[in-house]
Image (cartoon, rainbow, N blue to C red):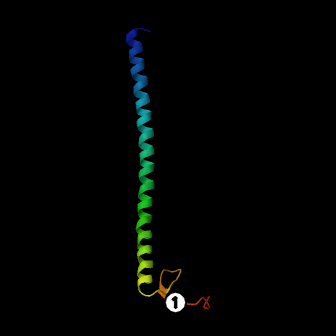
Amino acid sequence: MTPEEEWQANQARQAEEAARWEASTRAHLDARRATLAARQARQADEIAEIQHRFRVAMMGGGTLRPDGTYGPPTNGDDQ
């Protein structure tokens, strides 16, 4: 193999390695973006739930029901 051919082969290997690295990095970043988007979507719901619970507490308590509504305070006998 001539020096020119070796150089060309080396250039080809480096190009292939760069392409693999780019594809791997792109896939990794896409996965991270998807995870972040899912987390941000959940955060909106979590913030709304916290705000709701805070409002219920500030309105004098009450019972936060599993369906997200609230009612008058209970002593636990109604369960």
Residue 53 pos. (x, y %): 45, 78
**For residue 37, which quarter of the picture?**
bottom left
Residue ID for mark 1: 73
Q: Where does residue 73 sit, x and y in percent of width and height?
A: 51, 90
- Of 29 and 48, nearer the camera is 48
| Count of numbered circles on the image | 1
State which quadrant residue 26 falls in.
top left
Where 22 sits versus 35, above or below? above
Picture residue at 44% right of the left edge, 73% below the top: 50
Identity, as a three-letter code, of the amino acid under mark 1: Pro
Quarter of the rendering occupied by the C terminus: bottom right
Q: Which residue appears at 39% of the width and 15% of the height?
A: 7
Q: Residue at x 41, y 86 (%)?
A: 59
Seen in the picture, residue 41 relative to 3 is either above or below; the reply is: below
Residue shown at the point (53%, 80%) measured from the top left: 66
How many residues crowd mark 1 within 10 Å: few (<14), some (14–19), many (20+)? few
Task: Between residue 49 and residue 21, name the one nearer to us.
Answer: 49
Q: Secondary structure at mark 1?
A: loop
Residue 20, compared with residue 28, is above or below; it is above
Locate the N terminus by quadrant: top left
